[in-house]
Image (tube, rainbow, N blue to C red):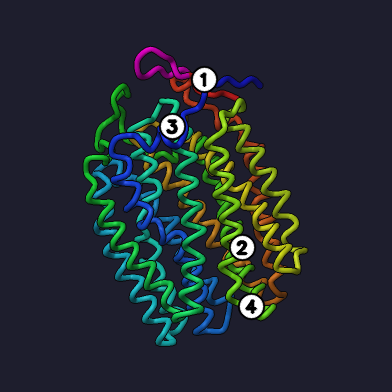
Amino acid sequence: MASTVASGRRPGYGQLLRTPGAWTFLLPGFAARQPFAMLTIGIVLLVQHTTGSYGSAGAVAAVTGVSMALFAPQSGKLADRFGQRAVLVPGVLVHTASVAVLTALALADAPLWALFAAAVPTGASVPQVGPMVRARWAAKVGGSRLMPTAAAFESVTDEFTFVVGPVLATALCTGVHPAAGLVAEAALTLAGGLLFAAQRRTQPAFGRPAAGEARTQHTSALSVPGVRALAVAFLGIGSVFGGMQVSLTAFTEEIGQPGMTGLLYGLFAAGNMLAGIAVGAIAWKSGPRRRLLLGYAGLTAAASLLWAAHSVVLLGVLGLVVGMFIAPALISGFTLVETLVPASARTEAFTWLTGSVALGQAAAVTVAGRLADAQGASAGFVVPLVGTALALVTLVALRSRLAPRAHSRTVARGVGHRVPVTVD
């Protein structure tokens, strides 16, 4: 397989951030992304505190994740058709109210079915700010040499929230009050989400094809075979997030140091963020499809060692290594979307991928929670291994579906140069 890259040096983060209007949606968007980083761990810590069961805590968090996975793509589709603001404002308000209800029920020792009922709207209304930011980047720099840098930057931003979010939620839950993590999550969602929605000038065009694209009947991004393959593969990434959150929490409880949860998860997320920075800074000679396969292979190999770690230091090192393979897989997958899906359906496509991560996380939280209750924290670490291995097998079998759309192989935009698209 041959690969080609555009000649010259890849544009850096500095050039990307000088894009007019970028900061107006990046700063509020960062605050509004916190639900994805804080919600699961906040629910696990609160419900485990009130029920004494990791299984019950994982089940409630899983209902939230499944609900998000089911509703997120619909949110993305509506944003593509009616605009991000029209979807985001009511979603933020519903999410804030739902988190408040879930928190109150947990503190009141409500039955598990009541927590499940509250978890459904909580997950369904999680604002899809990450995909919306990616769609704004695609509208501004799509088709140019800045797009891979933008994809890398977004992965770094996502992972930075996974450094800050779990550590902040854990510190608040263990140092202030078991419900403080969810309260902070709701407050950040409300403030950041409304500020982000207010940035109308950078909102992508909606309800019509982008310039240069034929007008066609609106169809789901999931009708694209490559998007379906990526959605299945991203379940594996979700299994890592969910399995690590529950298993690290159970491990620190077992050794009598619950405050270490945030630090260990922070190391995992830091590895992810550092790898994302590196991926975005390197002008790769291999295409995103090949990098995707290599990323999943490395992730599976690293995850295979987690269950055998029995010390904080070793688990911290392994978590860092596992995290370093997440970013290449995520960035490559999101980069492929730009070559697979027309601009009029990209927000939906991005939400299918983030929804798959949430669904994988939900399943992993449930299974890892049950295993941790029954056999200890080490058993929970088997979940990331199984999830990533199955995702790798799926990608290898379906790799032909990740080839770019025919007319995307040689897209020329701008003046004075032609931008080749990398092909494996």
Give the structural element (helix, strand or loop) at label 1.
Answer: loop
Mark 4, residue position: 257
Q: Quadrant of the N terminus?
A: top right
Mark 2 vs 4, N-terminal side:
2
Left or right, 228 with reference to 138: right
In this view, 393 is above or below 180: above
Q: Where is residue 233 shown, x and y percent of the image?
A: 58, 45
Q: Which numbered mark, 1 or 3, is in the foreground of this view?
A: 1
- Mark 2, Cα crowd under 10 Å, few <14 / some 14-19 / many 20+, is many
Which region is colored magenta? Answer: 410-419
Q: Which numbered mark, 2 or 3, is in the foreground of this view?
A: 3
- Picture residue at 34% right of the left edge, 61% below the top: 125
Mark 1 vs 4, N-terminal side:
1
Q: Nearer the viewer, residue 312 or 222?
A: 312
Q: Quadrant of the C terminus?
A: top right
Residue at mark 1 to residue at mark 3: CA–CA distance: 15 Å
Mark 3 vs 4, N-terminal side:
3
- Picture residue at 49% right of the left edge, 45% below the top: 155
Q: Nearer the viewer, residue 383 or 284?
A: 284
Mark 3, residue position: 147
Mark 2 vs 3, N-terminal side:
3
Residue 86 is covered by the magenta coloring: no
> Looking at the rendering, which quadrant does residue 212 occupy?
top left
Q: Which numbered mark, 1 or 2, is in the foreground of this view?
A: 1
- Picture residue at 45% right of the left edge, 49% below the top: 157
> Taking the image as drawn, is residue 328 in sight?
yes
Mark 1, residue position: 8
Residue at mark 2 to residue at mark 3: CA–CA distance: 31 Å
- Picture residue at 34% right of the left edge, 51% below the top: 27
